[in-house]
Amino acid sequence: MNDETPIFTYFRARKVFYMRPLQMVDLKQQYLQIKEEVDAAVLDVLNSSAYINGKPVQDFTAELAAYLDVKHVIPCANGTDALQIALMALGLEPGDEVITPSFTYIATTEVVALLRLKPVFVEVDPKTFCMDPESLRKAITPRTKAIVPVHLYGQSAPMEEILNIAQEHNLFVVEDNAQAIGAQYNFRDGKHKRTGTMGTIGCTSFFPSKNLGCYGDGGAIFTQDDQLAEQMRMIANHGQKTRYYHEVVGCNSRLDTIQAAVLRIKLAKLDQYIQARRNAAAFYDEAFKNQPLLRIPQTSAYSDHVYHQYTLIIDGVDNPAVFRDGLHQFLATKGIPSMIYYPVPAHRQKMFESFGSADQTLEVTDWLTERVISLPMHTALDEEQLKFITEHVIQYFNQK
Ligand SMILES: *Cc1c(COP(=O)(O)O)cnc(C)c1O
């Protein structure tokens, strides 16, 4: 334990214990483990004064392209920009339809409406929380132009089926990979690909709490397509290839050099970080596997899991949302954070009122919204903390 770390005390069997306070994501602890390396890299950037487009930006994008095995990595300012730039590059017309799951973070769907395109919301599979191909198939109309599957909580959407549907209907696929960087998809023919590299374009976020997070905002776009890559680089840079000659309306979206310097260090450790998340998830799974009212996260046959979130489903109680919120509050009184990702699905958001989506019936999405709860998940959870968390979750169920 570090001197700067405040101590959290608790009692078990009338003995006092000392533990690092629990957080959903313990960024401080992870930083302390790599502090020397990070501090030196950040100082190097400060000394170089190349704060924008410095060498670490090129180095990081090349290293990430190699890690993902993708031809082009285009850095940008955040994950939301990445999605926006991807959709801008596809040459869509106002009113064209873009299909997304409703059960996702708002950014996925917000950029669609922002670009005057029409978001069309579909269901997810209650086992994997990712887009349901049957629901997708039913939502396709002659105006459908693109599909945005989300690799939610760290597991791939069923890409093989989604790509087949896209090919049948001649649709673009933009993968929202903000939560699953490093995850791998297993195709039926035995081939493997990283999430974010299978569709027309892949997008990710380097927000601090993401699996590959920097110390501020950051994002990136991936593609195998040379022309799209050129177009997206241009859009992210005020629509110019040559300085002061602006060919298309673009935006200003860059990854800072300091963030790239941090990301280079963390990318080299990404597999190790993923393993730490898997170990924590395995501990949770083991502790909860025999709880009759809890469903532990399911891993699909086609994807591995990088556990951006460890999300449980509470099933079999009368008032699931009340019961679930009660667990959230009970844990809070014990110093254990938990989160509801996400309390309101996209189709019920006021921002989409004009699309009339609230009248839509998305049973699985609504069902999940009342029943999910995510527990602390990060790379520095130790066994004592995991034990403390799982014991209290079980205590709540035993009291009921
Ligand atoms: C975080 C996230 C985004 C947006 O990333 P930002 O960097 O915060 O803009 C988009 N989609 C999903 C699924 C996310 O989790």
Image (cartoon, rainbow, N blue to C red):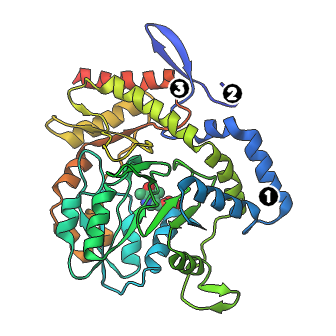
Q: Which residue is mark 1?
A: 45
- What element does badge 2 sit on? loop
- What element does badge 3 sit on? loop
Circle nearer the viewer, 2 or 1: 1
- What element does badge 1 sit on? helix
* Amino acid at dot 2: Asn
Mark toward the start of the polypeptide (3 vs 1): 1
Task: Return the residue nearer the eye: 140 or 122.
Answer: 140
Q: Which residue is mark 2?
A: 2
Mark 1: few, some, or many residues within 10 Å (few <14, many ≥20)? many
Query: Furthest residue to the right?
Result: 47
Q: How many marks?
A: 3
- Residue 301 versus residue 219 in the image, above or below: above
Circle nearer the viewer, 2 or 3: 3
* Amino acid at dot 3: Asp
Q: Which residue is mark 3?
A: 382
Q: Is the residue marked 1 within 8 Å of ligand 1, measured from its CB? A: no
Q: Residue at x 25, y 43 (%)?
A: 371
**CA distance for labels 2 and 3:** 14 Å
Query: Furthest residue to the front?
Result: 189
Mark toward the start of the polypeptide (2 vs 1): 2
- Compared across the picture, whether 41 is left or right of 125 comes to right
- Compared across the picture, whether 279 is left or right of 92 comes to right
- Compared across the picture, whether 320 is left or right of 96 comes to left
**CA distance for labels 3 and 1:** 33 Å
Instruction: Tell me residue 346's x, y (percent).
Output: 30, 63
- Compared across the picture, whether 181 is left or right of 367 comes to right
Q: Residue at x 19, y 62 (%)?
A: 135
* Amino acid at dot 1: Val
